[in-house]
Amino acid sequence: MDYKELMAEALKARKYSYSPYSNFCVGAALLCKNGKVYKGCNIENAAYTPSNCAERTAIFKAVSEGERDFEAIAIVGGKKGECGDFCAPCGVCRQVIAEFCGKDFKIILGNADKIEEYTLETLLPLAFTNKNLQ
Ligand code: THU
């Protein structure tokens, strides 16, 4: 699957965003090295802090199904009713990505018209990982 197709999956996931408090809808699609794709959306909560970002929804779904080898994640986000714009992952999601993915893991930002490719290393330099604990 190419990264434009992965972004199309993220746009599909975004339709299920449960975001009544922020009205900011995010979708993510995580590509495993075996070719499988796990989709996720943001899921908010009246108590706010239990809310979960789209990226973590996708990653937790995949890890809970036995997947740990990931190639790329596509992310799209924006105000409800708009087509979605560049939405960079929050710091917590970058840290969760770093738990499972190496420096070359690809982070694809964009929307239906345009995508940009980043690496985990670019978005989270000097990451704190399990290597620090050894
Ligand atoms: N959000 C994500 O799902 N992913 C991000 O990378 C940034 C923020 C969600 C969290 C919250 O539901 C809404 O967007 C506004 O912050």
Image (tube, helix red, strand yellow):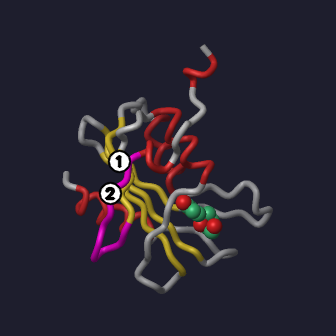
**Image position of 102 with respect to 134: above or below:** below
- Frontmost residue, 95 versus 26: 95
User: What amino acid is labelled 1 in the image?
Assistant: Lys
Residue at 51%, 37% in the rendered image = 98
Specify the quadrant of the image occupied by residue 36: top left
Magenta residues span 110-119
Majority secondary structure in the magenta region = strand
Horizontally, is 130 left or right of 69 in the view? Answer: right
Residue at 58%, 74% in the rendered image = 24
Specify the quadrant of the image occupied by residue 42: bottom right
Return the residue at label 2.
Answer: 117
User: Gap in Å between the C-alphas at discs 1 and 2?
Assistant: 7 Å
Q: Would the CB of label 2 be found within 8 Å of ligand 1?
A: no
x, y percent for residue 34: 25, 35
User: What amino acid is labelled 2 in the image?
Assistant: Glu
Q: What label does residue 106 carry, if any?
A: 1
x, y percent for residue 54: 52, 57
Residue 96 among magenta residues: no
- Disc 1 and disc 2 in contact, CB within 8 angstroms: yes
Horizontally, is 1 left or right of 92 in the view? Answer: left
Residue 116 among magenta residues: yes
Residue at 28%, 36% in the rendered image = 33
Structural crowding at the residue carrying mark 2, measured as other residues with C-alpha within 10 Å and reported as few (<14), some (14–19) or many (≥20)? few
x, y percent for residue 78: 50, 76
